[in-house]
Image (tube, rainbow, N blue to C red):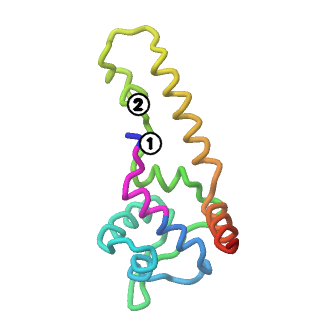
């Protein structure tokens, strides 16, 4: 599915919010949820996946919340998105040749062009880090 999901959108805005903070600052989920206008329960589920993948770190207790696990320069958009949704695939047959509805086909030009598109999309996601996005956002926000 080429449509960007709500989970991906919320996850990206959530980690971008953390990337703007001091690395040592533990940010409560409620603050992220409120600042980014994301339902807290949904965000909690997304951040659970991101925590398992080592992108964010969960801090328990009274002053609990989240920090990024690593430097935002080392966290790519691809990594965040694939943690939330799994590997990108523009069409089922790109992940699984047996999913082809026109089998058996030795060569499929449509599959090839979709594969090229998918590789380009993924390489853009690989190229940008959370730092890049935050810097870009801040630079543009200043310009009125």
The region drawn magenta spans 3-12
Crowd tier of the residue under label 1, counting other residues whose Cα lies within 10 Å: few below 14, some 14–19, many 20 or above:
few
The location of residue 101, given as percent across then percent down, is 29, 18
**Residue 1 place in picture, x, y as percent:** 37, 40
Q: Is residue 49 magenta?
A: no
Query: Do labels 1 and 2 touch, CB within 8 Å?
Result: yes
Q: Is residue 89 above or below residue 124?
A: above
Of the two numbered discs 1 and 2 on the same chain, state the one appearing first in sequence. 1
Q: Residue at x 51, y 83 (%)?
A: 26
Q: Label 1: which residue? A: 87
Callout 2: few (<14), some (14-19), or many (20+) C-alpha neighbours within 10 Å? few
In terms of secondary structure, where does tag 1 sit?
loop
Residue situated in front as seen by the camera: 45 or 144: 144
Kind of element beneath mark 2: helix
Which residue shows up at 38% across the image and 87% down it? 61
Residue drawn at x 56%, y 28% is: 116
Q: Nearer the viewer, residue 103 or 110?
A: 110
Q: Name the residue: 48% across, 71% down.
A: 57
Considering only vertical position in the picture, is 43 above or below 78?
below
* Location of residue 122 (image quadrant): top right
Query: Percent from the top left, x then y, of residue 25?
Result: 56, 83
The residue to which callout 2 is attached is 95
Question: Which quarter of the rendered picture does the C terminus lie within?
Answer: bottom right
Residue 52 horizontal/vertical position (percent): 42, 61
Magenta span: predominant SS is helix
Q: Height in image: 129 above or below 143?
A: above
């Amino acid at each position: 599915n080429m449509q960007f999901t709500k989970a991906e959108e919320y996850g990206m805005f959530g980690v971008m919010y953390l990337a703007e903070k001091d690395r040592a600052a533990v940010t409560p989920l409620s603050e992220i949820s409120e600042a980014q206008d994301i339902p807290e329960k949904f965000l909690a589920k997304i951040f659970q996946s991101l925590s398992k993948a080592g992108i964010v770190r969960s801090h328990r207790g009274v002053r609990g919340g989240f920090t990024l696990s690593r430097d935002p320069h080392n966290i790519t958009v691809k990594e965040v998105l694939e943690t939330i949704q799994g590997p990108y695939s523009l069409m089922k047959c790109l992940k699984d040749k047996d999913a082809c509805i026109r089998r058996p086909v030795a060569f499929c030009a449509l599959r090839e062009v979709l594969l090229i598109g998918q590789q380009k999309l993924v390489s853009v996601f690989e190229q940008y880090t959370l730092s890049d996005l935050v810097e870009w956002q801040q630079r543009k926000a200043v310009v009125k």
